[in-house]
């Protein structure tokens, strides 16, 4: 019984062909996984855009607070939309509420335009309020702004 070894060039072609096939499969999978656009929810339905604009009246950009555990007052202005207290799946572009983030961590879900963030420690901080739809998901494009402030001991 004799066995024949394939020609070295044939073996290289088989390995290259298998490698190329694997790359094509991986590329197709990654494209499919990334095919949900940011304007779509996890269920695939498109997110509405909003005419809203949010502004931060307090704190001001660059403001310095003194203390070791500071209460930071937040005052916002909203135009082009209104805040509604009810959470619902019935989404309209001009109704929603505000999520307030401090250093990319949500610290409040507000149905008003004023708040106080307690116990802010020394350091540089970024405040980012975002007007979101009544289902707590963002509009597309997102409606937010930000300021940076500092707390010094």
Image (cartoon, rainbow, N blue to C red):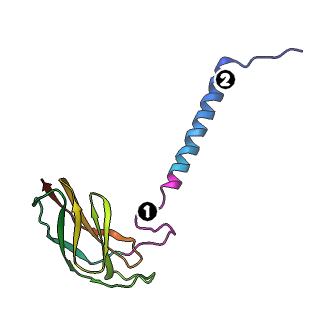
From the viewer's perspective, tell me whether residue 60 is left or right of residue 38.
Answer: left
Disc 2 marks which residue? 11
- Per the rendered image, the range of residues in magenta is 31-48
Q: Where is residue 49 in the image (x, y as percent from the top left)?
A: 34, 74
Q: In this view, does 95 lie above or below 107?
A: below
Decide: is 85 above or below 151: below
* Badge nearest the viewer, 1 or 2: 1
Tell me the number on the disc at residue 37: 1
SS at badge 1: loop
Q: Residue at x 38, y 79 (%)?
A: 134
Please tell me whether the stretch drawn in magenta is mainly helix, strand or loop.
loop
Within 10 Å of disc 2 (Cα), the crowding (few <14, some 14-19, many 20+) is few
Q: In the image, is residue 46 part of the stretch drawn in magenta?
A: yes
Q: How many marks?
A: 2
Q: Where is residue 72 in the image (x, y as percent from the top left)?
A: 17, 66
SS assignment at label 2: helix
């Amino acid at each position: 019984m004799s066995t024949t070894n394939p020609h070295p060039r044939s073996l290289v072609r088989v390995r290259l062909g298998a490698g190329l096939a694997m790359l094509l499969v991986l590329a197709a999978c990654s494209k499919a996984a990334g095919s949900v656009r940011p304007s779509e929810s996890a269920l695939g339905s498109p997110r509405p855009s909003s005419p809203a604009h949010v502004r931060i009246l307090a704190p001001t950009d660059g403001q310095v607070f003194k203390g070791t555990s500071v209460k930071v007052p937040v005052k916002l202005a909203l135009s082009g939309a209104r805040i509604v207290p009810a959470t619902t799946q019935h989404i309209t572009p001009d109704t929603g509420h505000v999520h307030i983030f401090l250093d990319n961590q949500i610290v409040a879900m507000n149905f008003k335009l004023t708040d106080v963030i307690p116990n802010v420690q020394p350091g540089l901080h970024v405040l980012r309020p975002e007007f979101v739809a009544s289902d707590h998901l963002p509009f597309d494009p997102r409606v937010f702004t930000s300021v940076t402030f500092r707390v010094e001991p």
